Image: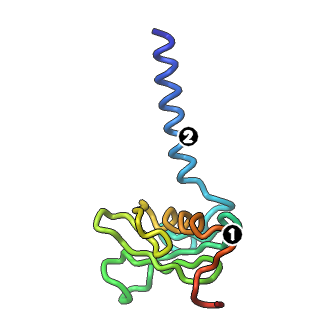
Amino acid sequence: MGGLIGVAVAAVAGQAGLQWWARRPAQGPPSDDLGEGAFDEMYEGRHIRGSRAAAGRHQGGAAWDVTVDGRPLHLMRRADGGYLSMVDHYQSYPTPLVATRRAVDELGRGQQLRGRGA
């Protein structure tokens, strides 16, 4: 019986650890002055920044202005409430931050987004 309880506690602790790992700041905390859900951080050696788009530019407040190293990354809101990027448009991610991090992962070290500064 004690072994089963130990396994259950380890499973719960492991799941909580995985959830924390997925939500953690990558390399420094996001800036709080950008607005709700906004982020400004270094991730995998890239400067990623995102904030809600200015009112009137998009409908519903779901649009985001996101950049990777100062170059725009287009995010789209999906019907399931998640987000996708134009770099990785086959997968839905729960937040703009996670979608941006996965786009950086997909780009790798040698590629840049097209746009400003190109």
Residue hosting label 2:
17
Residue in the image at 36% along x and 89% along y: 56
Closer-to-camera residue (29/78): 78
What amino acid type is highlighted by mark number 2? Answer: Gly
In this rendering, position of residue 41 left or right of residue 98? right
Residue pushed farthest right? 45
Closer-to-camera residue (3/113): 113
- Looking at the picture, how far across and down is residue 15, in whole percent? 49, 37
Residue hosting label 1:
109
Q: How busy is the neighbourhood of tag 1: few (under 14 within 10 Å), some, or many (20 plus)? A: few
Residue 39 falls in image quadrant: bottom right
- Looking at the picture, how far across and down is residue 12, in whole percent? 48, 31
Q: Is residue 99 above or below residue 3?
A: below
- Looking at the picture, how far across and down is residue 6, in whole percent? 52, 18
Q: How busy is the neighbourhood of tag 2: few (under 14 within 10 Å), some, or many (20 plus)? A: few
Q: Quadrant of the N terminus?
A: top left
Q: Is residue 33 above or below residue 13?
A: below
Looking at the rendered structure, the secondary structure element under dot 2 is helix
What amino acid type is highlighted by mark number 1? Answer: Arg
